Amino acid sequence: MQKILFVDPEKCTGCRLCEIACSLHHEKVSNPSRARIHIVKWENAGLFIPMICQQCETPICEIVCPMGAISRDEKTGAVLIDKELCVGCKLCVMFCPLGGVGIDKNRKILKCDLCDGDPLCVKYCIPGALQFMDANAINIKKRRIAAEKLSELMKKLLEVSL
């Protein structure tokens, strides 16, 4: 059975262990800016939001990629970028509505690959803000409700900021 990444921002403490584990695994450096997950902080609101690719059912990044460099791994369900085909045009970065695709200073695209089906960020998330769960109807509904809650929260934060 496929699995999904579940993000519960209400449990995130902003410790950034997920970012460190990710950058160490993928880039062999302890540098959160090189991670595929990023913690967005609204410290005045006491809110920390893990931003990571949600492996969309219909990925916009895949649709806009002019090189056909983005596809889904049937085994893990991860939406992957073929580094040999990617030209670094940044369309995937610009069109991702969730901020799940990034780019480093060398124009290398940084996107979650679910660590081949065993995401390290989940393993190192002590508060349980990140979970990797079966993609059954109940968990998909939980994820949709959490996304709606996050969207409402973001709207409120943006209203306060402006």
Image: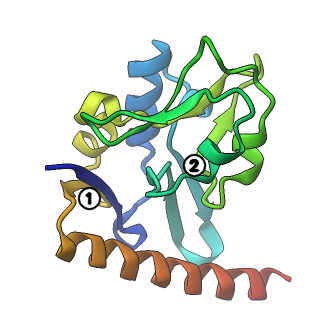
Of mark 2 and mark 1, the one earlier in the sequence is 2
Up/down of 79 relative to 47, above or below: above
In the rendered structure, the answer to whether residue 33 lies left or right of residue 161 reads left
The location of residue 71, given as percent across then percent down, is 49, 34
The residue indicated by pointer 2 is 100
Q: Position of residue 11 (x, y in %)?
A: 34, 68
Say few, some or many: other residues with alpha carbon within 10 Å of mark 1 (under 14 / 14 to 19 / 20 or more): some
- Based on the displayed image, in which of its 4 quarters is residue 136 positioned? bottom left
Query: In the depicted view, which residue is nearer to us: 62 or 49?
Result: 62
Q: Is residue 133 above or below residue 140?
A: above
Residue depicted at x 50% and y 43%: 37
Q: Residue at x 55, y 21 (%)?
A: 82
Q: CA distance from mark 2 to mark 1?
A: 21 Å
**Residue 107 image label:** none
Please state the horizontal and vertical placement of residue 42, each as a whole percent of the image: 63, 68
Is 161 placed left or right of 68 in the picture? right
Res 151 quadrant in image: bottom right
Q: Looking at the image, which residue is at 62% across and 32% down?
A: 33
Q: Amino acid at mark 2?
A: Gly
x, y percent for residue 156: 66, 88
Query: Depth-wise, is mark 2 or mark 1 nearer the camera?
Result: 2
Q: Quadrant of residue 81?
A: top right
For disc 2, the neighbor class at 10 Å (few under 14, some 14 to 19, many from 20) is many
In the structure shown, which secondary structural element does the residue marked by tag 1 occupy?
loop
| Circle number at residue 127 | 1
